[in-house]
């Protein structure tokens, strides 16, 4: 083998033992060891392998270029443009690039955000237990490993010699990766099969630490109450309870996995941008308590030291008992399987006066068959209803509209309106019935402001087959000084991310919200905090939403990666809905509302606009 520099003895020994000579200057036929199928977790928290990237039979992957990365190493960041160029040039030639992140404290959300902000199109994921690092003898980032389709190692080392910890050369003297790729694709022996890597050392992961000993009653139960039991209780929104010791112990390994991944409690906003009052994320201390408890064998502890149990509402309504309930007249028959066209239903109720409400909840009678539902108001005589009269929706993992009685904000349903539902049912494997009802809580006392919103919704969707990062964007101005209430995103199963930007009149731009790993099953709303941390938007600000879609075969939820995907209501098509909700700062309605009807007492008196 051609000698190009000194390697540490431990690194060289590990590699030689691992590949039994396959890093020598030789063709793939001479490689004597096939590596295990490298596993990692993708940005959707799913376990994946290199085999998932093998490509279709008519266009099989010829080789894998595995890039070990993190979000902080300066050398690794400098090489990102080169890695994107390599992916663009060699991807069409059958080389699949995949980025594996190795830092313990970097979350999958962090990884997705890093890839998004750097325009990375190739798949990325986390080496969640450093098994890939160990299997490939990797010690630093950014190290790359080239393998053929049978997972024989052909090259391992640096990308080139331009960027180093101590400084930067004006130009590289040799592009080690591209030379290896060219030789491999030409069927030649790899002339330089390993090179030293001058980057950031990968730190071994440390086990979770917490107060000793950690017991359920003294420590874990407090975390469950604060972060989990709101959903995980008998009669709650989830299929199992996490209230008692036996409840949590029976699910302990799964709880540890989702807490360690930070997949639960569900939250998809990047912590780098904005603050949201409904963020349920655990603190590091809370995570460590749960993980340490499972690692220590799940001791129960002294039940006398447990916190008082939470009292859960027995109401079927999350908003409390509504003042008005409107229910569909009839049930729908849902088949056992197949796609179901959207149902459009008019609810049997007409609002005879302007009605002000501060909470609205759409409630499926049978939750298992309703994927989502949108509700709008409309006037049958005037024929006005649709996107501009949207009220709220029901989505997986979502919450009802609750404006709160303390801030004098309400939603106005105009006189003469009736309600229309757009219902998306889903099948369960057996025939089912579907029916919904809607609960309204009237505003009480004084109403000063009503809610306003926009839907950023470009319709020109045409996602090419195999495209992993198809981009759409839409912009709309807010004409007056405003305070944001929140944002909400709806896409279908190819949706990858959505980012909301505020382009201010002074030329500055701020990221309001970034959802780097959008999840179709957890379409959450992101609620802005109350004063003094509320989000102020000056008049003339342009709100922009930017979304990307993954129509590649690596997207595990993609119905057909060979299809050009248009706009459409069904999940096998795509949508772009970027909702933004706000109130105007100068609006002072001074309306006194009858708490029994939601109507204005004595007529409207508008003090200012």
Image (cartoon, rainbow, N blue to C red):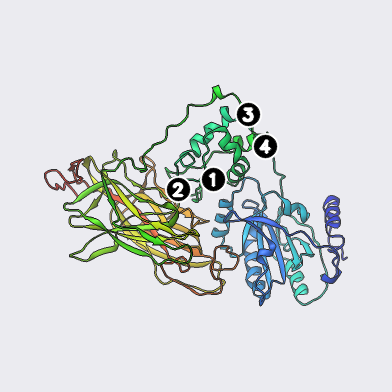
Which residue bears the numbered disc 1?
A: 264
**Upstream in sequence: badge 4 or badge 1:** 1
* Residue 140 placement (x, y as % from top left): 73, 53
Tell which of 368 and 388 is nearer to you: 368
Quarter of the figure with residue 42? bottom right
Q: Quadrant of the N terminus?
A: bottom right
**Upstream in sequence: badge 4 or badge 3:** 3
Q: Are marks 4 and 3 in contact (CB under 8 Å)?
A: no
- Picture disc at residue 295: 4
Which residue bears the numbered disc 2?
A: 274
Farthest left residue in view: 602
Camera-side mark, 4 or 2? 4
CA distance separating discs 4 and 3: 13 Å
CA distance separating discs 4 and 1: 18 Å
- Picture disc at residue 211: 3
Camera-side mark, 1 or 3? 1
| SS for dot 2 | loop
**Upstream in sequence: badge 1 or badge 2:** 1
Q: Are marks 4 and 2 in contact (CB under 8 Å)?
A: no
CA distance separating discs 4 and 2: 34 Å
Q: Is residue 419 left or right of residue 6?
A: left
Tell which of 588 and 368 is nearer to you: 368
Mark 3 is surrounded, within 10 Å at the Cα level, by few (under 14), some (14 to 19) or many (20 or more) other residues, namely few
| SS for dot 1 | loop
Q: How many marks?
A: 4
Quarter of the figure with residue 158? bottom right
**Upstream in sequence: badge 4 or badge 2:** 2
CA distance separating discs 1 and 2: 20 Å
**Upstream in sequence: badge 1 or badge 3:** 3
Q: Are marks 3 and 2 in contact (CB under 8 Å)?
A: no
CA distance separating discs 3 and 2: 32 Å
């Amino acid at each position: 083998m051609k000698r190009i520099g000194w390697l540490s003895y431990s690194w060289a020994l590990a590699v030689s033992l691992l590949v039994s000579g396959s890093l020598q200057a030789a063709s793939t036929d001479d490689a004597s060891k096939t590596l295990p199928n490298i596993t990692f977790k993708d940005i959707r928290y799913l376990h994946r392998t290199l085999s998932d990237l093998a490509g279709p039979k008519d266009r099989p992957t010829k080789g894998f270029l595995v890039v070990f990365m993190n979000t902080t190493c300066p050398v690794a960041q400098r090489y990102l443009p080169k890695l994107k160029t390599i992916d663009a040039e060699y991807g069409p030639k059958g080389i699949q690039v995949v980025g594996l992140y190795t830092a313990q404290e970097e979350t999958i959300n962090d990884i997705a955000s890093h890839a998004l902000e750097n325009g990375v199109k190739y798949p990325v994921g986390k080496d969640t237990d450093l098994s890939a690092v160990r299997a490939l003898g990797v010690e630093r980032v950014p190290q790359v490993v080239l393998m053929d389709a049978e997972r024989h190692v052909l090259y391992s080392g640096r990308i080139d010699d331009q960027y180093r910890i101590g400084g930067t050369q004006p130009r590289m003297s040799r592009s080690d990766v591209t030379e290896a790729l060219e030789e491999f694709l030409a069927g030649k022996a790899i002339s330089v099969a390993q090179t030293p890597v001058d980057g950031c050392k990968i730190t071994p992961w440390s086990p979770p630490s917490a107060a000793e000993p950690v017991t359920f009653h003294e420590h874990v139960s407090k975390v469950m109450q604060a972060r989990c039991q709101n959903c995980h209780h008998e009669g709650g929104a989830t299929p199992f309870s996490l209230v008692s010791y036996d409840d949590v112990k029976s699910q302990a390994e799964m709880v540890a996995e989702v807490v360690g991944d930070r997949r639960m409690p569900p939250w998809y906003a990047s912590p780098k941008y904005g603050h949201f009052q409904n963020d349920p994320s655990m603190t590091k201390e809370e995570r460590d308590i749960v993980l340490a408890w499972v690692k220590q064998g799940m001791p129960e502890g002294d039940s006398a030291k447990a916190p008082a149990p939470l009292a859960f509402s027995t109401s079927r309504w999350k908003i409390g008992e509504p003042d008005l309930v409107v229910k569909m007249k009839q049930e729908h028959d849902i088949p056992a399987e197949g796609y179901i066209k959207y149902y459009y239903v008019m609810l049997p109720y007409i609002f005879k006066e302007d009605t002000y409400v501060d909470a609205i909840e759409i409630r499926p009678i049978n939750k298992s068959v309703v994927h989502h539902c949108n509700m709008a108001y409309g006037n049958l005589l005037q024929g006005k209803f649709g996107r501009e009269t949207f009220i709220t929706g029901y989505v997986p993992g979502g919450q009802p509209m609750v404006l709160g009685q303390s801030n004098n904000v309400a939603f106005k349903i105009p006189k003469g309106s009736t309600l229309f539902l757009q219902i998306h049912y889903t099948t369960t494997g057996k025939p089912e019935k579907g029916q919904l009802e809607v609960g309204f809580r009237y505003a009480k006392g004084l109403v000063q402001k009503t809610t306003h919103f926009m839907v950023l919704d470009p319709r020109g969707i045409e996602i090419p087959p195999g495209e992993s990062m198809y981009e759409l964007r839409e912009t709309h101005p807010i004409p007056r000084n405003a305070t944001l209430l929140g944002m909400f995103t709806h896409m279908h199963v190819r949706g990858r991310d959505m980012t909301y930007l505020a382009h201010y009149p002074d030329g500055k731009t701020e990221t309001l919200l970034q959802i780097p790993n959008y999840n179709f099953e957890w379409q959450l709303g992101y609620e802005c905090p109350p004063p003094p941390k509320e989000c102020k938007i000056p008049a003339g600000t342009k709100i922009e939403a930017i979304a990307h879609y993954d129509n590649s075969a690596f997207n595990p939820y993609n119905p057909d990666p060979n299809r050009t995907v248009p706009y459409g209501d069904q999940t096998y098509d795509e949508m772009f809905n970027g909702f933004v909700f706000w109130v105007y700062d100068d609006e002072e309605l001074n309306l006194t509302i009858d708490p029994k009807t939601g109507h204005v007492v004595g007529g409207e008196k508008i003090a200012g606009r």
